Image: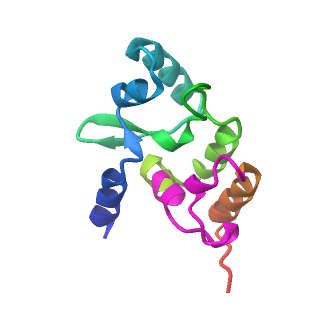
Amino acid sequence: MLKLAKKAILDSGDFLTLDQIAQRLGLPPMTLIAAMYEWETEGHIFSIQHAGCSLFPAYVFQDDTEHGLIPDLKAILDVLRAKKDGWGIAFWFASSNGYIGNRRPQDVLFSEADKLLLAAMDEVSGITHG
């Protein structure tokens, strides 16, 4: 089942290499590589590993003109990292979440980051809803 879940994430097109993200944002790859290294080191972004390569979520970037990450992402990631690795975080963002009306966190990241922070806290608390 884990293998199928990983395949779904990889096939979604939501995770890209640094070169692909640079191309999508219209930035020189070397500029983005330096920024991504800093962002990942400081916990502002996460990655998944596949075939010896780091892949980053394309859905966390504001837009093609801003080029930055959404401001509240680090707080959400700080909570999730208490219990999840990169793949676990990717699964969480891609899965329907009852806390946000059965939508996927990645779909409401820009519009409802405050609710996502609460949903992340709920996720790591281990409380089950009946």
Residue in the picture at 47% in, 52% down: 90
Relative placement, left or right, of 36 versus 118 is: left
Of all residues, the one furthest to the bottom in this rendering is 130
Q: How is the image coloured?
A: rainbow
Residue in the picture at 65% in, 41% down: 73
Above or below, 86 relative to 38: below
Above or below, 8 relative to 38: below
Of residue 34 and residue 61, the one placed in the foreground of this image is: 61
Residue 38 sits in quarter: top right
Q: Position of residue 72 (x, y in %)?
A: 71, 40
Above or below, 68 relative to 52: above
Q: Position of residue 33 (x, y in %)?
A: 43, 19
- Number of marks present in the image shown: 0
Residue in the picture at 47% in, 40% down: 58
Q: Position of residue 50 (x, y in %)?
A: 28, 43
Which quadrant of the figure contains the N terminus? bottom left
**Is 109 in the magenta?**
yes
Of all residues, the one furthest to the left in this rendering is 51
Residue in the picture at 68% in, 73% down: 127
Residue 119 sits in quarter: bottom right
Which quadrant of the figure contains the C terminus? bottom right
Chain part drawn in magenta = 90-112
**Is 61 in the magenta?**
no
Relative placement, left or right, of 20 versus 26 is: left
Q: Position of residue 126 (x, y in %)?
A: 64, 69
Relative placement, left or right, of 94 versus 19 is: right
